[in-house]
Amino acid sequence: MLIGRGMSTWFTHLDATTSCSSVSVLSAVLRRQRFLIRSLGGNPDQNCSVKMNVFEADVLNVIRRITPTLDLSRHKGQAGKIAVVGGCREYTGAPYFAAISALKIGADLSHVFCTKDAAPIIKSYSPELIVHPVLEESYNVKDEDKGFIANKVLSEVNKWMERFDCLVIGPGLGRDPFLLDCVSEILKHARQLNIPLVIDGDGLFLVTNSLGLVSGYPLAVLTPNVNEYKRLVKRVLDCEVNDDESAAELLSLVKGIGGATVLRKGKSDLICDGDSVFSVSISGSPRRCGGQGDILSGTVAVFLSWARQHVLLAEEDLGIRTMNPTVIGCVAGSALLRKAASITFQNKKRATLTSDIIEYLGMSLDEICPM
Ligand SMILES: NC(=O)C1=CN([C@@H]2O[C@H](COP(=O)(O)OP(=O)(O)OC[C@H]3O[C@@H](n4cnc5c(N)ncnc54)[C@H](OP(=O)(O)O)[C@@H]3O)[C@@H](O)[C@H]2O)[C@@H](O)CC1
Ligand SMILES: Nc1ncnc2c1ncn2[C@@H]1O[C@H](COP(=O)(O)OP(=O)(O)OP(=O)(O)O)[C@@H](O)[C@H]1O
Ligand SMILES: [Mg+2]
């Protein structure tokens, strides 16, 4: 299939034939793709068979187009203000990895909203992070105080909310029911304010059980790993994961959730917003140490914010204006993490740890966008 002029600078077409059962789901998608291709100068009729179109993203081009230049006239905050909602008694590393990664690639401010127990520990990892000890777990709250405490948590978070360009919800959040109820309310408030959301880790546990929290919200990105994806597929499609039809299955999943973008992490990362499926498969690291998904959530949050800014400003850039900023954010975040992980592995081999990968994020981005 030939891809139109604008589109071909962004994506390479990969083939993945779909089953007949997927045809009706795909027809709307194909119609939109044909429109996109036509509007970008291509000929959609050169491919008449029913295919699941998977585009391999031109990741360097994507990253270069949206990364802001370092310019002495810019003020603090313009390159992004990110907040991570996560961090509890068990997990302090995950929110730290997400929040510090956002800063390392160029965000100006990075906040963490976590439980009171986790806050001093996360603060001690880095003075760069703004850490709010506001969340509460059930063990710390008497039943009769729950209503009052929940209101207090919400008002503490809500007074900051409007300042953020993106929220990352879930790294190291835990699964305490009272805490998750409070986070549901935080999420609903963020939606009312049209703030983009990256949902990861235990945030996915929450939304998988309450899909209404994200359905119909185009600024939500879900970043499931293998287990999290299995649970989503089971819940939404009521079946087991079928790797032989991964692109069509992902499309059905996204349609089933309705309106969010999903980044399925794996050997290749697959990204879908309900229109098309994009793949990022540049080489990463063979080390699967924990925390790499947390880096990804922080980088996607920043690139999504940059993509949104770019789409709003780039009136003449037709290629980017037809793209969904959540997809651009996922493609860029995935590619940068994989590149940094690959460079780290070349240097550290088996000793590669998540903290090492974080140290290579800035250099990896500089290589793509030299100053
Ligand atoms: N250094 C850190 O601080 C890091 C912290 N991390 C943080 O860890 C959290 C979980 O993320 P993960 O990736 O371990 O979840 P996943 O692959 O679904 O589970 C694996 C297996 O464990 C189980 N299970 C998990 N959580 C459970 C719970 N709360 N309570 C009960 N069971 C639980 C689960 O069983 P299941 O319930 O799915 O049957 C599955 O078999 C998340 O907040 C993440 O951000 C990571 O980012 C890594 C670095
Ligand atoms: N087999 C693989 N080969 C290369 N890269 C991979 C592979 N699996 C995952 N990755 C990359 O690692 C990143 C993190 O994915 P992973 O599945 O480890 O997430 P996770 O389990 O949520 O991580 P975390 O430990 O932070 O919770 C993804 O962006 C993906 O690109
Ligand atoms: Mg994870």
Image (cartoon, grey):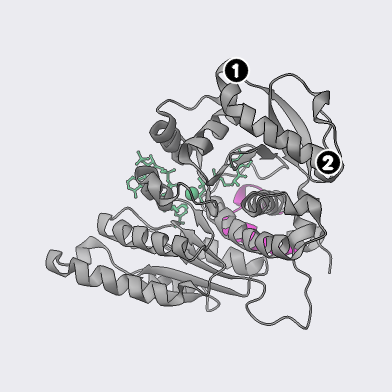
Residue topped by disc 2? 8
Q: Which residue is mark 1?
A: 19
**Which quarter of the figure has residue 136?**
bottom left
Element at label 2: helix
In the rendered image, the quadrant that contains the C terminus is bottom right
The residue under label 2 is which amino acid type? Ser
Residue 356 visible in rendering:
no
Point out residue 295 in the picture as x, y percentages from the top left corner: 57, 57
Residue 180, given in percent of the width and then of the height, sits at: 32, 57
Task: Identify whether 243 is placed above or below 161.
Answer: above
Span of residues in magenta? 347-363
State the separation of the CA atoms marked 1 and 2.
26 Å
Q: Nearer the viewer, residue 191 or 66?
A: 191
Vertical relation: 103 (above or below) 287: below
**Do the residues bearing badges 1 and 2 touch, measured as CB atoms within 8 Å?**
no
User: Can you name the residue that lies furthest to the left here?
Assistant: 144
Residue at disc 1, CB closer than 8 Å to ligand 2? no
